[in-house]
Amino acid sequence: MRLDPSVIDQIAGLYLADDRPWAVGFSGGKDSTALLQLVFQALAKIPSEARRKHVHVVSNDTLVEIPQVAQMVVETLVKIEKAADRRGLPIVVAQTRPELDDSFFVNILGRGYPSPTSRFRWCTERMKIDPTTRYIKKLVETRGEVIILLGARKAESNTRAQTMESHRIEGSVLRRHSTLPRSYVYTPIEDWTTQEVWAYLVGVPSPWGGDNRALFHLYKRADGGECPLVIDKSTPSCGNSRFGCWTCTVIENDKAVEGFIESGDEHLEPLLEFRNFLKDARSRRDLRERVRKNGQLKNQDGEEVWGPFTLEARKTILRRLLETEKKAGFQLISVDELLLIQRLWKQGGRSLTGPTADIDFSVAKILRETRGETAMSGYLDLLEGGVDPLLKAVCEQHDLPPELIERLKAEEEAVAHLQRREGIFQRIDEILDSVPAK
């Protein structure tokens, strides 16, 4: 491809126009790679003394990315950082992640959220939008305004094209961000076709030493597209064919993982099997509560509601996840997530099907069952705290069950960091009401 130099000149001119910092969305896919290469080329044209503001390369890790893609992105970010340092370019590399409380498995296992659907896509905001938004808001707080560079293209869909035009600033290449105040969006490759993107990547060497032909073959293996950096709800999270979360149950079939497996990555088969199990589990009535977390029993049409996964269902899902982790050879859930899940299980919740509070340290028991005593001793020490001896003695003195106090403690710990402890007294009453009368 013969690159139109006006694109690079436009990027360089916008950089020099003011002191607003830039945040370049980088997912590791073809569009964001092409965008970042153009930024590298533009910065290289600018005299070093004129490069006065930082360019933040922001990549989001949902913690459930396809392992091959996640590894590629991490390796690429390291190369970008080293290349920028060698060339004296003012580039800052950052990888955002969801808060522990917002992670996929904490919500599925800890709170019993059903696996996401197109109508209840609870994951996008928690795992993608919020982490990146937090980073951009910090830039705004310190510098007043920010310009966000994205590899979005009109050719991707009519909806995308309409969205890109809706906030356009007349006479400017920028558009206002739909939700973030004092934030502006710049999309320099918005008019490129997919063929032009690949022609550029294959024809122009990567300035950080990346292998764009390997990226092309990665796409061929996965038969998919990239999951863009999502900065608002108007940005499509992922299409039917994409690189993204291996746990995604919004789509009917995960063509990306299926493509990897067909291309020889058989070790991903356990991940695909777990994903399909999780997708089917949400439609099983026996695995779902008959009451929602807000106490609702029927919807507005008078029909029975489907609540969160039952505690027993969550135990089953955790067991399947740990077995999958062992088969695949990848770490799929962190120790911190397991600890928070155990705490959430201890708090309990609403149910019409049976006990919801787990006081038996079931996370540790499931770990022991799936991994063995010796291999998981570090986890077990953290997870199996047992009842404090002093608490046990005090409870015996006052004829109180230690498990009740443990549940009350867990509920208090869950809201201790909040300024408004809304609902705490109601939850305490519910726990006290659950104790059988003597």
Image (cartoon, rainbow, N blue to C red):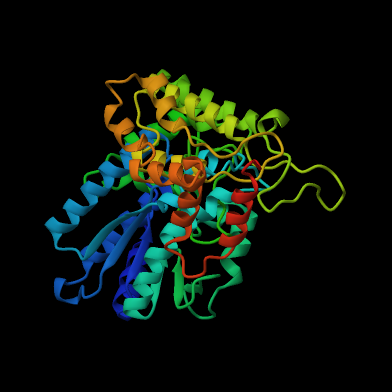
* Residue 54 screen position, x and y as percent: 26, 69
In the foreground, 25 or 395 = 395
Of all residues, the one furthest to the front in this rendering is 397
In the foreground, 284 or 90 = 284
* Residue 194 screen position, x and y as percent: 49, 46
Q: Residue at x 43, y 35 (%)?
A: 219
Indicate left or right for 211 with 292 as reference: left
- Is residue 174 depicted above or below 88 in this figure? below
Of all residues, the one furthest to the right in this rendering is 302
- Is residue 149 depicted above or below 261 in this figure? below
Question: How many labels were placed on the picture?
Answer: 0
> Can you see residue 18?
yes
Q: Residue at x 41, y 53 (%)?
A: 99
* Residue 311 screen position, x and y as percent: 58, 35
> Can you see residue 151?
no
Q: Quadrant of residue 145?
A: bottom left
- Is residue 375 depicted above or below 157 in this figure? above
In the foreground, 377 or 428 = 428
Of all residues, the one furthest to the left in this rendering is 86
Indicate left or right for 111 with 148 as reference: right
The C terminus lies in quadrant: top right
* Residue 420 screen position, x and y as percent: 51, 69
Q: Residue at x 62, y 59 (%)?
A: 426
